[in-house]
Amino acid sequence: MTRSIKTLLAGLILLMCLAIPGHSQVTEGDDGPLRFGRFEHEGKIHYGFISFGGVHTLTGSFFDKETVVTGNVIPLDEVKVLAPVVPGKVIGIARNYKSHGGRGGKLQFFAKLPSSIIGPEEIIVPPTGSTDLHYEGEMVIVMGAQAKNVSEKEALSYVFGVTAGNDITERSFGSDGYSILKAKGSDTFAPLGPWISPGLTIDNLKFETQVNGRTVQKASTRQMIHSPARIISELSRFITLEAGDVIYTGTAGTTAALQEGDVVDVLLEGIGRLRNTVGATPK
């Protein structure tokens, strides 16, 4: 991590320890990963972290160097968990697993839109004309600092953490240059969450997708063709990546069409479960 990210995390961890005597970790167990996110409570949106007692709120975003712990703790069952970040850029990686048509070669990436982001338990709404809506469960990188022209060696030091994502795709819209934006970037096409965990070994995390409780995808990020470090380094040659930007790193295996009422879960090791339901196509 860059010095600024390390300093921020170290400061937050210290404050957590002071706020929660006897506990130096913030999760469901003493050795679990940190979990940061965004939450709504009584009409107000808070940034915070999950710890003993519930959501410990922060004075601002966890990307802000001036952020401190407020001391206010809200029971988890009283908050609505939102998408953990509001990204300026949402980037996707295509064909990054051999099991999903990847053959190596040049890195292929595309843009989704910030307006496509939704959080856990929100509804995926198929757009008008949708006939072949597919799930694509995957790991999502959350940037923690500005990155431009960074090397592969230093790339991961700019990462804040990872979360789970679902790169919803309307295959009937096509994938050429004129169609890919609505096929990938329509509203609600980027479920994200439920929270961000820093410090995980992101090159070796298990993930799976379930539809109505049945496993339909299962893989590990170690099977990626292009590593997270290479992805970040390559993207930073053309695009300045900022704190809060997210990168959907590619899906594995085969996908299939979703139907109204389907419940889609993406489970990522160290993160947990991202659940969304498919709604009706507008008439």
Image (cartoon, rainbow, N blue to C red):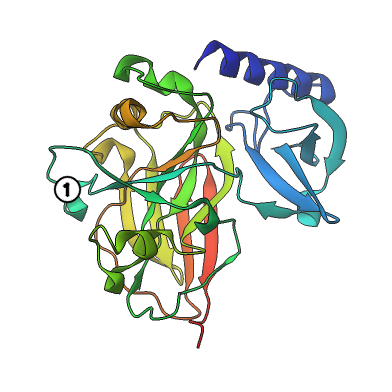
Q: As displayed, is residue 16 above or below residue 274?
A: above
137 sits to left or right of 61? left
Crowdedness near tag 1: few (<14), some (14–19) or many (≥20) residues, C-alpha within 10 Å: some
> Amino acid type of disc 1?
Gly
**x and y percent of residue 247 in the render?**
41, 41
Q: Is residue 162 left or right of residue 27?
A: left
Q: Position of residue 262 (x, y in %)?
A: 47, 75
- Taking the spot 57% from the left edge, 38% from the top edge, the residue there is 196
Which residue is at the front of the view, 104 or 276?
Answer: 104
Q: Would you say 223 lies left or right of 243 here?
A: left
Camera-side residue of 85 and 72 = 85
| Residue for badge 1 | 102
* Most distant residue in the front direction: 178
Does 217 sit above or below residue 147? below
Residue 270 spot, x, y in % from top left: 50, 39
Does 51 sit above or below residue 158? below
